[in-house]
Amino acid sequence: MLKRPAFLKENDQVAVIATAKNFSAEQLETGLAMLEEWRLKVCPGKNLYKEDHQFAGTDKERLKDLQHALDDKNIRAIFCVRGGYGTNRIIDQVDMRQFRQSPKWLAGFSDVTVLHCLLQREGFQSIHGTMPILFGRDSPASLESLRKTLFGEEIQYEIKTDPLNKKGKCEGILIGGNLSILQSMIGTKTDFDSRKKILFIEEIDEYLYHIDRMMIHLKRAGKLKDLSGLVVGHLTDMKDNEAAFGKNVKEIILESVKDYKFPVCFNFPSGHEKENMALRFGAKVRLHIGREKSLLSF
């Protein structure tokens, strides 16, 4: 199990920053209010509302806010406002020396997968979950799962059964995130170690042949063969070409892992939809995929 930062408590200071796409102040109002309802002291990044074309400020400005949040010993968690694109543009300039001395939670998903991979390489846990810009959209259960995870309350998920599941039981450290971001990390300084891990993946707005290409890339790079298990979250708004690919997205994923014996669970409620349940990456979890239901326990 990777090192776990201290769970939050009331009156802890938390940073709210943006490492990728821009947004408006109005879009963030609900999220900031919710963090305050959780009795947390919100510390917005100095460059939080900056814009540079599609980005939330220049690379230098976004990096500065991220670095400050990582370094400040009084900050106990970092919330990334949203995903989009841009975190990989600044990731190689991040200095983790102060963070190693005073680790804290980092929460987010989608493009934030880049930061989850960095923290895994550094040996620390992080949280895959909904982000402040989505607090007004996502389900109450999603928000409560994030709060429970941050404050260290026990969590167990019961997952809807899918006929394509590969039944079985396994234990392992949970890693993962957005599939396209994970693929883009291969061969970089923030490449991920999948050996004996339970891998979680989710994706949105991709062509089926893109999914096939990404899964084949993971297989060729050796990221699938030594998994303990695979958990598949939301696969949202998948698209096909005029000439059909010939398989649906779940069949594509199953084909890529057909040579391996580890269990596979579809339908985990996490990703780019309103039901976006929090996951603690880097924690040891138990996965039981049965005939009538599946369980993921921390």
Image: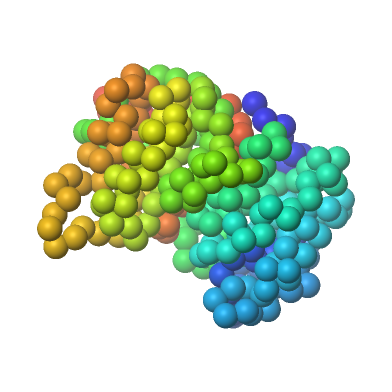
Residue 207 visible in the shown view:
yes
Which residue is pictured at 33% across the width and 22% down the height? 260
- Classify residue 178 as left or right of residue 298: left
Q: Position of residue 242 (x, y in %)?
A: 14, 62
Placement of 227 over or under 17, stated as above or below: above
Colour mapping used in the image: rainbow
Please tell me which residue is depicted at 87% across the width and 50% down the height of the picture: 73
Q: Which quarter of the picture shows residue 50?
A: bottom right
Residue 54's place in the image compared with 266, above or below, is below
Give residue 6's position: percent from left, percent from top. 76, 39
Residue 199, position as x, y percentages in the image: 47, 34
Position of residue 232 in the picture relative to residue 245 (left or right): right
Of 163 and 65, the residue lying toward us: 65
Q: Is residue 11 visible?
A: no
Quarter that holds the C terminus: top right
Q: Nearer the viewer, residue 38 or 241?
A: 241
x and y percentages locating residue 228 in the rendered image: 45, 23
Nearest the viewer among 26 and 205 is 205
Q: Is residue 60 left or right of residue 27?
A: right
Q: Quadrant of the N terminus?
A: top right
* Residue 149 occupies quadrant: top right
